[in-house]
Amino acid sequence: MRFVFCVILGIGLLLPALVKASPGGETTYSQSEDQNVSGVPLKTEEIPEVALFKEGANEIMFMTGGLFSTASGNGRYPFDEIPTLTYWGWMLTTPDKGGIFRGNLEVLVGLYASAIIKGFGSTVVGPQISIRYNFVQPNSRFIPFVEGGLGFVFTDAYTVKTQSMIGQAIEFTPQLGGGCRYMLDTHWSFNFEILFHHMSNADMASRNIGVNELGGLIGFSYLLGRPH
């Protein structure tokens, strides 16, 4: 229920911005020598909504939401968080082919900072790095993505000796996610993501049952640079 409330509240707050930024009609692109059969230029750098998804472009991203433990019993206790993630993104490739898998690779370097709202301890914070694949279609403002990443965090949860899930101050955090962004204009996008997040210490400590969490994130990105 807490996750559902967070998502509904976030969408309610951001809906006016989406409505205001949505175009009043279909975008018309000028004719060029490099076109596909629908008349839409294939080269990403010629398309306003996705012009900055090209090699060397950067973005700043801010995401927040809720992560909730997926199991209990056998030594596992509820462990829920409200994380905020701040990323710097760097486009590694430029979309250059057609088809449903047309897209590019992006590396994201960021800071994970979270308040523990249920369970033990109070804080989780640390750096992380992720590789994302953006499915960039030249005639769509919607850009789905999948990603995987790894990081490490500092947490005070290990100080609670009556649990065996978190055994030391430094824990490792592999994660997998997928979602979609909607381009509000050439630079701004609204993002939504479903994220699986794991936390454990690779048996570096005697207590290492670990934490598995699933949840959702929403936020904004700003793509840097000039479209052309």
Image (spheres, rainbow, N blue to C red):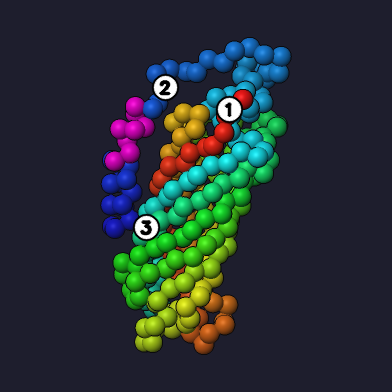
Chain part drawn in magenta = 13-20
Going 32% across and 35% down the picture, which residue do you hit? 15
Give residue 123's position: percent from left, percent from top.
Answer: 38, 69
- Which amino acid is tagged 2? Pro
Upstream in sequence: badge 3 or badge 1:
3
Upstream in sequence: badge 1 or badge 2:
2
52 or 70, nearer to the observer:
52
Quadrant of the image occupied by residue 225: top right
The secondary element bearing badge 3 is classed as strand
How far apart in space, not on screen, are marks 3 and 2 (Cα)?
31 Å
Question: Which residue lies under the disc numbered 2?
Answer: 23
The secondary element bearing badge 2 is classed as loop
How far apart in space, not on screen, are marks 1 and 2 (Cα)?
18 Å
- State whether residue 139 is above or below residue 163: above
- State whether residue 29 is above or below residue 43: above
Going 36% across and 87% down the picture, which residue do you hit? 162
- Which amino acid is tagged 3? Gly
Answer yes or no: do the residues labelled 3 and 2 have beta carbons within 8 Å?
A: no
Question: Which residue lies under the disc numbered 3?
Answer: 66
How far apart in space, not on screen, are marks 3 and 1 (Cα)?
34 Å
- Which amino acid is tagged 1? Pro
Question: Which residue lies under the disc numbered 1?
Answer: 227
The residue mark sitting in front, 3 or 1, is 1
| Quadrant position of the C terminus in the picture | top right
Give residue 79's position: percent from left, percent from top.
Answer: 37, 70
Q: Is residue 193 left or right of residue 105?
A: left
| Quadrant position of the N terminus in the picture | bottom left
The residue mark sitting in front, 1 or 2, is 1
